Amino acid sequence: MLTAITRAFRTPDLRKKLLFTLGIIALFRLGSVLPTPGVNATNVRLCLDQAQAGDSNNIYGMVQLFSGGALLKLSVFALGIMPYITASIILQLLTVVIPRLEALKKEGQAGNAKITQYTRYLTIGLGVLQSTAFVALARSGQLFPSCREAILLNQDVFTIVTMVVTMTAGTAVIMWLGELVTDRGVGNGMSILIFTQVIAVFPAELLNIYRLSPFKFVVVMVVGVVMIAVVVFIEQAQRRIPVQYAKRMVGRRMYGGTSTYIPLKVNQASIIPVIFASSLLYLPQLLVTIFGNSQQPNAVIEWLAQNLVRGDHPVYMATFFLLIIFFTYFYVSIIFNPVDVADNMKKYGGFIPGIRPGRPTAEYLSFVLNRLTAAGAPYLGVISLIPIIALAVAGASQNFPFGGTSILIMVGVGLDTVKQIESQLQQRNYEGFLR
Amino acid sequence: MASVADFVRRFLDRPGSVDLTPFQRTVERAGELEAEVRERAELRAGEVGTPEFCAVMREAARRALGQRPFDVQLVGMLAMLDGHVAQMATGEGKTLAGALSAAGFALQGKHVHAVSVNDYLARRDAEWMRPLFEILGLTVGWISETSTREERRDAYTKDVTYAAVSELGFDVLRDRLVTDPAELVVPAPQVALVDEADSVLVDEARVPLVLAGAADPGTAVPEMAALVRRLSRGYHYKVDQEGRSVFLTAKGTDTVEKALGVDLYQDPGVVTEVNLALHAHALLTRDVDYIVRDGRVHLINQSRGRVALLQRWPDGLQAAVEAKEKLPASETGEILDSLTIQGLLRGYPEICGMTGTAVAVGEQLREFYDLKVAVIPPNKPCVRVDEPDRIFATAEARQEALLDEIDAQHATGRPILIGTLDVAESERLDEALRARGLRPVVLNAKNDAEEAAIIARAGAQGTITVSTQMAGRGTDIRLGGRPADDDGTAGDPEGSVEESTESDVDESTERTVADLGGLYVIGTGRHDSSRLDDQLRGRAGRQGDPGGSVFFVSGEDELLTAYAAGESLPPSDPDGVVRHKRAEELVAHAQRVAEGVNLEIHRNTWRYTRLMEEQRTHVLELRDRVLHGDAAAEALREAFPDRFRELSETAGTDVVEQACRQIVLFHLDRCWTEHLGYLADLREGIHLRALGRLNPLDEFNREAAPAYRSLLDEVEQRSKETFETADVTADLADQGLKRPTATWTYLVQDNPFGSDWERILQRVAGTLKRRRKK
């Protein structure tokens, strides 16, 4: 992998692409720490420190993760890529419902260009909405409920409007940066930006741990590196089911079909089940926050508050683990439909040697897939639980930086990007005996 | 300011087009010089692109051909000299404008390859324009399929060489097999001037040119053809919605297994034979996809409606079709090398072109060739009346209305041109018209030879011409037409003559036809690209003539069933006509989907061939070094100094060097052929990688690059082995190479499964629709 990158830097056009991508990342980080006009940066830092010392498991957890800490800093790029991602998801869902969008989608490139255009408009819309919401929260002091400092320099309408406009413009710029990376850099722009935000918080958090205890720092680093290695290993693991295509007569030669196979991954579902499971586990927390204050304690709420809100409780951990396993099976069954795959293979003349196309093939595929997922689902569960267990064992209140979600995102995007670089590296230095 | 308004308009409706103002200014000034240049005894062009140059070119054309180029033709010439694609309507004199710019390039000392779509046009244009080139002191040559190697080499030494794009590609491919530098034919590419640029650069670019050799006798299995003939559609086998693939059902598998007595899916060989036979039987239709002539199967080029002489189906399909038609199997070959037209043309440092319909593909020309489109205004404004489509619910209603319309128009004496989508349809229509007592003339792939004559008469009063695809037919239709005895091959097929010496078109008949409304073009269905529709429409209303066009579309047309599947036309009125606005939208939508699909195929082909083309360039570099130098001898001397010395002493250094060259060339070519086979195999199943969340294109490149590296090792190892064991004094060339044939490729979609999201959405959508129906 390292050789690939050094070789990439020696190839002029790839070097250009890599430097371009790095430049965009630098710009992106700059915008993420640059405070929006009107924000009292000193007070925000004070409040952030307080919040970190307190209960870190707040409602903004996932959003904060994707914004690389920019959100609570109320920086220019506070909203991050979330509005764009949300907009794309909404539009993709709408293509199912609105016939006009469905028609556009079918028209290939020209139609998709229009859909992208709508996505951009919607992103701006969402940007206005979200930035207004956050600025309002900041203004009323609800952003950091435990902090008494004034976050905004002053409260007049002009300042508020400036802030909303700045953050919305920031969102638009991020969208553009992402597209620039996709077009002229390496990798998928959006993934690269998410990747950047996920790892951006590492240095600060590691430094925190180091300040507290160098020994803990070493332990955390060792655990982190081991986890990354394990995740890289398992993410690459696949079961190759050989497929043969029988539509062409290629003289007398037979190529054994070693390069034609269905790669079934051990972790076919990737990160989605973890995100589903943790989102679902915010629900009890939300319920407790809403109903917990009532004078007569409700038995159910009481139980929830005891067992499912605190991450270090065994019931919480067990629920989390089981939810992940459930969602893994659920999601795999949605994205990999053996019947569709078998039908498609049949249509194009492909078959698994020794197995009839159609239903027998589908049955075989789902058999293999189920057994693979039986290993993949617990793996996801364990990886996601490690940080929580570490919290419980260490009894430390600070964040454990190598969260399951972070590592899965990091490794996933990293692997994809390196593969893309490798694929572009291709040749240039073929050496043979003819000089 | 007019130019500002012009600029804004250009910006608004034709992004990416070229600003013509500087060219127009130059041509204006050339007009002032015209009288003076006319007096000159000798024509010297001066610097290319200046007003004087334009004036001289105009005078040259006047003296040599008796034609004075219009201003717009000169503007087109300047646009092409500047490296753009000129869009000029049919009948505006593209041929002359093209020849003028070819001459312009040649006067700068460059070799110009004027690329045309077929042999007939290459030859016609070269012969027709010869006087023009000669008066400017330039030489011109042409190449056709039947040209010998010497004729070709000779033609390539000329300043301007007219050739069909496929011939050019084949020459390049054949050159890569020579083992003696003296046998090379094609010089280094300099300028390509492409006629019918959209067709060549976009439509044809999808089809790789293939060099095949080492022929085996065909492996058609007549028993298989007989077997699949007994199967019935829907029960034993199914055809998918788009009509692109066919597969056995479980019942069909049982039947075939019983008939053959084998376990089908243990042995890929037998399955392949069955699949090929089934494909030939169920998906390819006689007179639509191919015709049988002189005991041979000839493919029909769908975008041209012509017989594609050099094209064959790949990988055993040809033999399967021959077995279906109970013909003897023709030879099959192994692919020695292949080259896409895009790869071929991108090899030219300078490229420009002309066509009637470029704007629609402007985006693709920019993406794939870095070309811009210059929209040349017509000499006289076009007054053709394009009627909106008439849409019918059923093909039957359409046929009825179509015949009535032809009858009605014919009664007035107006000439009618009917464009059909395939050969079979043109014949059905011919029959139906004859049943009504009309006398149509049919032009299709079966009687290409009479083409020019038929077209020449198509504008005469009272003629009905039924023709397949009009794109790339080159000749245009003059109102009033020409007498039947005209030989129709030479002369002035592309109009635009002011001082025409032609007397055979009678002024008064032309006026009569014009008074009737000019040529009336009827399309029996929309094509799957709006450009082809426009090409057909463009046959009427040339040079400011009156004319009209209309398309008759039915809900059962392939365009709608294949590309707007699942959507239905609004209900029709009692007379079978669908007048709802939504119908028009649906037809346009289907056409856009078809265009999108084709663009995606083009882009994919290019993505997947790009690495191969790079490797090919590298192989050719190595090959050149072996061919022109003694790289092979050096390498083998280094590997086996003793044997090399020993052999040189007995046989002479020259002989050994020559032998080394032959050995390495042989293995290089052999390994390349095997590499191509491997790549084709890899490509076929690479889309499956998407199921493991991998990007198929990245995966393809990641596998293809190491494969190429091992190819180079293989060449080394095999060459060494041969050198050690072979008798270098004996004849090494025991590998006879057969004449290359082109093939047609079929493509596997990049990711037919769609992304995760698409799969989820499909399922959700499916459930929703099912609910709605309940």
Image (cartoon, coloured by chain):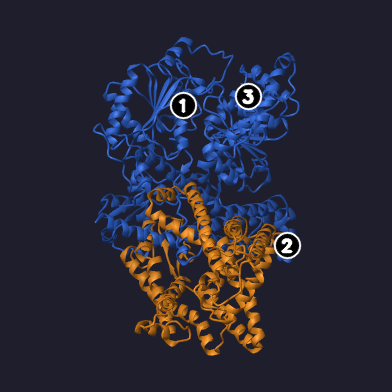
Chain colours: A orange, B blue
Give B198 or A308, whichever is nearer the viewer. Answer: A308
- What secondary structure is marked by label 3? helix
How far is disc 3 from disc 2 in space, using C-alphas?
A: 53 Å
Q: Is residue B592 left or right of residue B128?
A: left
Q: Earlier in the sequence, mark 3 or mark 2?
A: 3
- What secondary structure is marked by label 1? loop
Q: Earlier in the sequence, mark 3 or mark 1?
A: 3
- What secondary structure is marked by label 2? helix
Residue B6 in view of the camera: yes
Give A351 or B242, whichever is nearer the viewer. Answer: B242
The circle on residue B130 is 3
Residue matched to label 2: B637
Tags 3 and 2 in contact by the CB under 8 Å rule?
A: no
The circle on residue B539 is 1
Q: Is residue B143 above or below residue B500?
A: below
Q: Chain of mark 2?
A: B
Q: Residue at x 43, y 45 (%)?
A: B593
Q: Chain of mark 3?
A: B
